[in-house]
Image: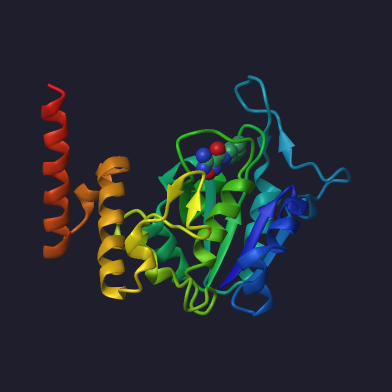
């Protein structure tokens, strides 16, 4: 996978490329990543990338010419890449979209600043408009990092066998089970006994229960979307009944 980021702040990406799993993926040539300064494509002496909005008002808009030149150049270098604009007006990013993006050979991520980019860029040169959530940040760079991070860990060979992305319960539409490590007793609170037992089948059962219960309590919307197998249906029924009992007690 090739990532090219177009931004007026390419230095923001240096620490991102330089740490953790993203760094390892670059070192092992599982991903190729660069951040390119849109300013390099500005033709004027002062390399201006913004201008005042037509129709008036406060703030500045990113000029179309440098951005178009940058996108076209990236597209010529990265054959068959998809272009992604990070914007609160895009489709809200999720794991399924991460999987789709991971299937492409290259991604060109366009990071806006100021009040936004000239509308004609969005129409002509952008394949996907993606939002990382319903809030506004000061530029597309952090959003771009989130997309790259989520996509990178899905590239085959990026995670080790133990960490593998298919093992995430989120990829099965559930929240992760609870995790514990040493010590056995921390501030008076014990690790669940079953996790110390060495009964692998029982531990797997406990983890599925933990996943399902947490999803039911914290993110019931995820259960609505998910196809449940027999075992999962049984667990869910049990927890719903248990919750119902508690609620009855307090009524
Ligand atoms: N939310 N998801 C987001 C964002 C900032 C002005 C256009 C978001 O993806 N990007 O809030 N972006 C704005 C800042 C230019 C992007």
Total labels: the figure holds 0
Q: Residue furthest right?
A: 45
Which is nearer the eye, 185 or 248? 185
Q: Is residue 108 above or below residue 9?
A: below
Please tell me which residue is depicted at 59% across the width and 77% down the height of the picture.
30
Which is nearer the eye, 6 or 51? 6
Query: Residue 166's spot in the image, x, y percent?
Result: 38, 71
Query: Residue 183's spot in the image, x, y percent?
Result: 53, 57
Quadrant (top left/top right/bottom left/bottom right) for the N terminus: bottom right
The answer to which image quadrant residue 100 occupies is: bottom left
Ligand 1 visible in quadrant: top right
Q: Is residue 177 above or below residue 111?
A: below
Query: Residue 174's spot in the image, x, y percent?
Result: 30, 55
Please tell me which residue is depicted at 47% across the width and 48% down the height of the picture.
130
Left or right placement of residue 185 versus residue 121 in this view? left
Please tell me which residue is depicted at 43% across the width and 69% down the height of the picture.
165
The answer to which image quadrant residue 98 occupies is: bottom left
Query: Residue 2's spot in the image, x, y percent?
Result: 60, 71
Please tell me which residue is depicted at 41% across the width and 55% down the height of the picture.
191
The answer to which image quadrant residue 28 occupies is: bottom right
């Amino acid at each position: 996978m090739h990532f090219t980021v177009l931004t007026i702040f390419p230095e923001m990406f240096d620490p991102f490329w330089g740490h953790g799993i993203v760094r390892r993926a670059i070192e092992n040539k599982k991903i190729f990543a660069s951040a390119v300064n849109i300013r390099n494509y500005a033709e004027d002496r002062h390399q201006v990338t913004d201008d005042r909005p037509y129709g008036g008002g406060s703030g500045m808009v990113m000029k179309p010419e440098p951005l178009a030149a940058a996108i076209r150049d990236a597209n010529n270098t990265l054959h068959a890449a998809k272009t992604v604009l990070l914007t609160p007006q895009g489709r809200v990013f999720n794991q399924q979209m991460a999987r789709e993006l991971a299937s492409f050979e290259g991604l060109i991520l366009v990071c806006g600043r100021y009040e936004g980019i000239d509308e004609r860029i969005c129409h002509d040169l952008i394949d996907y408009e993606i939002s990382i959530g319903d809030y506004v940040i000061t530029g597309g760079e952090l959003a771009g990092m989130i997309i790259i991070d989520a996509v990178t860990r899905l590239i085959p060979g990026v995670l080790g066998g133990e960490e593998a992305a298919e093992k995430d319960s989120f990829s099965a539409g559930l929240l992760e089970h609870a995790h514990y490590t040493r010590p056995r007793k921390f501030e008076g609170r014990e690790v669940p006994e079953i996790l110390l037992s060495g009964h692998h089948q029982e531990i797997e059962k406990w983890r599925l229960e933990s996943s399902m219960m947490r999803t039911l309590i914290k993110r019931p919307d995820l259960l609505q979307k998910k196809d449940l197998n027999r075992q999962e249906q049984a667990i869910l029924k049990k927890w719903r009944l248990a919750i119902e009992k508690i609620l009855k007690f307090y009524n």
